[in-house]
Amino acid sequence: MKLILPFALGGGALLVPALASAHFLMVAPTPWLQQDQRGDPQKLAPCGGVSANPGVPTGVVTPVRGGDMLHVKLQETVFHPGHYRLALAVYGRSELPADPPTKTRDTEKGPWSVSARIDKNPKRPILADGLFQHTTKQEGFFETDVKLPNIDCATCTLQVIEWMGEHGKGADGDYSYHHCAVLKITANPDLPVDRAWQKRLP
């Protein structure tokens, strides 16, 4: 099954109810860390690895054009209900947002995730939120196209996170898994520059 969702999100924030450890592969663009068949290591924010294994960089920088649609392709290798979020850092990974605020319930094993905030009117650095919401196992790939800002950026970082419901808090990554890709964005001279994306975030 292939789920292809266009980048079109609008208005407001909400809590999405979630229906236990997920893993996903970042198929496209090429991730910045080497992955095994499950997508590991991927727990630590903002871009993967785990405390015991920070991961091995691929060294891949994906060239793209500003103002174009970027194709993102993921595969969930270990099922877990949840959703995905995309963000873009221009001046360094410190710009990447924190993982989604998570509502939890107490259990004998500690806090358990119930729901997470989704911003349906995302602003920089978030490109899209609440993607591929699912409560049952999906076969095939999750795919979407997201519009890139029209800027020049030698080493932008695209972050993809998966938020997991009905999951215990992990020592690495809390309730989310993380992958990143390094993008070299070259502005399209035929389009206006997205000047808001050229300002450094506080």
Image (spheres, helix red, strand yellow):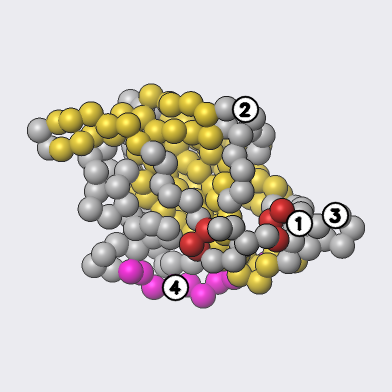
Mark pair 1, 2: CA separation: 23 Å
Pick the front one: 43 or 153: 153
Q: Is residue 130 above or below residue 97?
A: above
Q: What residue is shown with label 4? A: 57
Pick the front one: 135 or 48: 48
Q: Residue furthest bottom?
A: 59
Q: What residue is shown with label 3? A: 192
Q: Amino acid at mark 2?
A: Gly
Q: Which residues are magenta?
A: 54-65
How would you rate the neighbour count of disc 3 (Cα within 10 Å): few for under 14, some for 14-19, many for 20 or more?
few
The numbered mark, 3 or 4, whose residue comes first in the sequence reads 4
Q: What residue is shown with label 2? A: 11
How would you rate the neighbour count of disc 2 (Cα within 10 Å): few for under 14, some for 14-19, many for 20 or more?
few
Q: What residue is shown with label 1? A: 195
The numbered mark, 1 or 2, whose residue comes first in the sequence reads 2
At which x and y percent is residue 194? Answer: 76, 54
User: Residue at 61% of width from left, 43% of height from top?
Assistant: 123
Q: Amino acid at mark 4?
A: Pro
How would you rate the neighbour count of disc 1 (Cα within 10 Å): few for under 14, some for 14-19, many for 20 or more?
few
